[in-house]
Amino acid sequence: MALAVGDNPRQGRGVHKTMLARIANTLYWMGRYLERTEHLARYLRVQYFTTQDAPMSQNRHFVLNSIVNMAGVPWEEGSELDEAEILFNVALDSNNPMSILSTITFARENARGMRNVISTELWEVINKYYHYVNNYPVAYFKTRGLYDFTLAAGENCSVIRGYVDSTLTHNDVWALIRLGVHLERTAQIARIISCKLYDIYSLTNGKEDMPVENYQYTVLLKLLESFDMNRHHYKAAPDRQKSLEFLILNADFPRSLAFNLRQIQFFLRKLGLNEKTPESVGFKVGRLCAKYQYLLFSEIENEVGAFVTETLNCVYEIHDTLEKDYFHV
Amino acid sequence: MTTTSNLFQHYPLNAAFFDEVFRQDGQVYPHYEDIHRQFSRLTSADFERLNEYAKLSFLNQGITYAVYSDGHKGAEQIFPFDLFPRVIPAADWEMLEKGLIQRNLALNLFIKDVYGERKILKDKIVPSALIFSSPHYSEEMKSIRPKNDIYCHISGTDLIRHSDGRYYVLEDNLRSPSGVSYVLSNRDAMKRTLSNAFRWSSVCSVNEYPAELLATLQSVAPNTEERPTCALLTPGTYNSAYYEHSFLAQTMGIELVEGRDLFVENNYVYMRTIHGPKRVDVIYRRIDDAFLDPLVFRPESMLGVAGIMGAYRAGNITIVNAPGTGVADDKAVCSYVPDMIRYYLDEEPIIPNVPTYLCEREDDLKYVLEHIQELVIKPVDMSGGYGVMICDRLSKAELEEVKLYIQADPRNYIAQPRMSLSVHSTYIEKKGEFEPRHIDLRTFTLMGKERPYVLPGGLSRVALKEGSLIVNSSQGGGSKDTWVTV
């Protein structure tokens, strides 16, 4: 975006409250990082504990593999997977830039860089969450602390989101954090669905195996804390169609792709960034939302993996456009 | 009341120093009676619990600094805070407030004079050589007249109390004095930890400071029809005072900007926002003069804003404090402030200076070299307690070395008698009880268009090491809440 002001010194006295581009970027990323830590923690916990009593070949190795894939742990293909090491790496390893510790550290650094625009109360809960993770005893975590740690991480994220919504004026600051939250959530839901589809493929070798599949679709719902609401919605045990349709297209469930895309659109409009040129971020988001709004699951049933990947790529493109047009002016 | 209770049972009294809390006979001064009574009722265990709670309060507020010595994991430390508040009686404060306003008015007139008519130099009250040899003298400011003739909007004056019980000015800080955020955070921590203490005493509030600061900034804005836009310019999150920058921006409700957030076009300063450029009228900058504008000062500066001095010269932005104010907070210039007060205000100084010997004066240099063992030697333009030499602690050989330094560059050194900073009861964690420690007081004065404002109290800094006179946080100092009684 051009920043030419021309000869008129009165320009730049507009009605919008000031939102520095650098701060906008920081707020947006804080939202993204916070949301990311929650998904990482939940994936770790649910995947690890729900499959402990899983039937048949759904063994430890499979679980660890799934965690490695989702969390993007740099692990050599084919090498022995060390459980304690992997769990530590995903959660508390400061050398892994994708770990929960690194992510909350980034989120807190971002918050620190713009404390003046957020509430003291919000800053303190973010800071407390950081200290909780940073001071968590590593030895305890590796032996017995996984459940406790990951649950507390999720709770902290909920508390922080509560403070975002209830202690900030619902202005640009708030909208940018929420924009980051929903964009990250969209990406994480898409990644979790993709990972699970890959898990199922590798468990069944592409052959039909209903019990294994249905069990994994239940895990998928639990990974997004959507199992109960899914049952309420369909009044039937989950299967492939019910779980994927729910997580992709249900516009009322807050951990579905359709819901979060609508939120992204809402917050962009709130920020006044919804220009209509085809290159604009508003146009890109609107187009994707429109597609989701009138889509039937039967239309994507045979290519869910590809469809979800396509959505993920669109989300990345939306992110790139935001950075280029608004954050790095 | 005597000093027999638990936390005070070994409290030593030393006639060489003024103890703020206890008289030499062990009696407590009247303005400390309430708070002392409360502490006397506590056991070590009680107090330890309160102390831990206060620390947690700082940790959760994020008032910490990172320590990188133990590898990459940034263990965070809080700045040491002592729960025993320093109490200043209303009558003392009334005198100090008057004295601080007087001093800062004179300093502002002096800076205006230096960059204007130079009457005080022509009248030989202050030697010209002292001014033009100062690294903080700014040739640039000769052609610039700041709004309302205010150069030094925010100043930090350091006071001490000598063994005679009198207050003295140790030095002036006229560039970007820091520490005020700790005054407010310390008060917050006190309220969270020892809320009872406030029930017994009437203490002046310090919470007005951000509003007063904002009013000061707005009062010196260039002429605009709209409400002026103010911003605080910080070097960034890695600066050691970053916490304070963000704290002040937050509490004033103004933008905290870095150099890269600003640009200048047609001599107006703008912020880069997601909705396009937005004009700025007043910059409270917390970066040094040298980094302000790469076009005028250091060309390699990444922290500043290219063209901002042009906008300043055109009267389209106010820079707070004005560039070049450092010319008056040089420790050698400091010794002339009493003369400035007499010259510009025709008044006698209310708060005396610590007697100062300027090594560049022949007589003074002679005295310094002869009496070096009784003196404290300071470089004129260093802050943070760096480079200070307390000569009675040096060996013969070291003293000779110091003499050589001074003789090589007399302009760079001043000497002061070793002032006995007063002591104050301070909780010593290792011992689980109170002991006397040396303190000073950094005060904060605001000079806007309407009227001056002095923050009641200020930052009482305490040297936590036994016997140490260096109160700076970078060298093992802590701080206390400071109460001015109503």
Image (tube, rainbow, N blue to C red):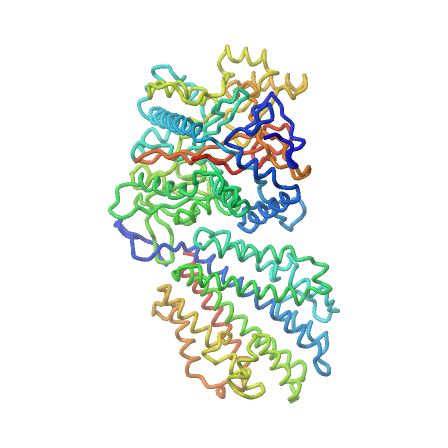
Q: Residue furthest front?
A: B1
Q: Nearer the viewer, residue B460 or B266?
A: B460
Q: Quadrant of residue B137?
A: top left
List x then y, in percent, for residue B104: 39, 28
Q: Is residue B255 left or right of residue B442?
A: left
Q: Nearer the viewer, residue B366 or B195?
A: B195
Q: Is residue B135 left or right of residue B471?
A: left
List x then y, in percent, for residue B419: 55, 21
Q: Quadrant of residue B394?
A: top right
Please report the residue visible at 50 percent of the width from the left and 24 percent of the height from the top: B380
List x then y, in percent, for residue A35: 53, 65
Q: Nearer the viewer, residue B305 or B374?
A: B374
Rendered position, A160 above or below B166:
below
Quadrant showing the N terminus of chain B: top right
Q: Is residue B110 left or right of residue B240?
A: left
Rendered position, A234 above or below A36:
below
Rendered position, A112 above or below B122:
below
Quadrant showing the C terminus of chain B: top left
Number of labelled discs?
Answer: 0
Q: Quadrant of residue A87?
A: bottom right
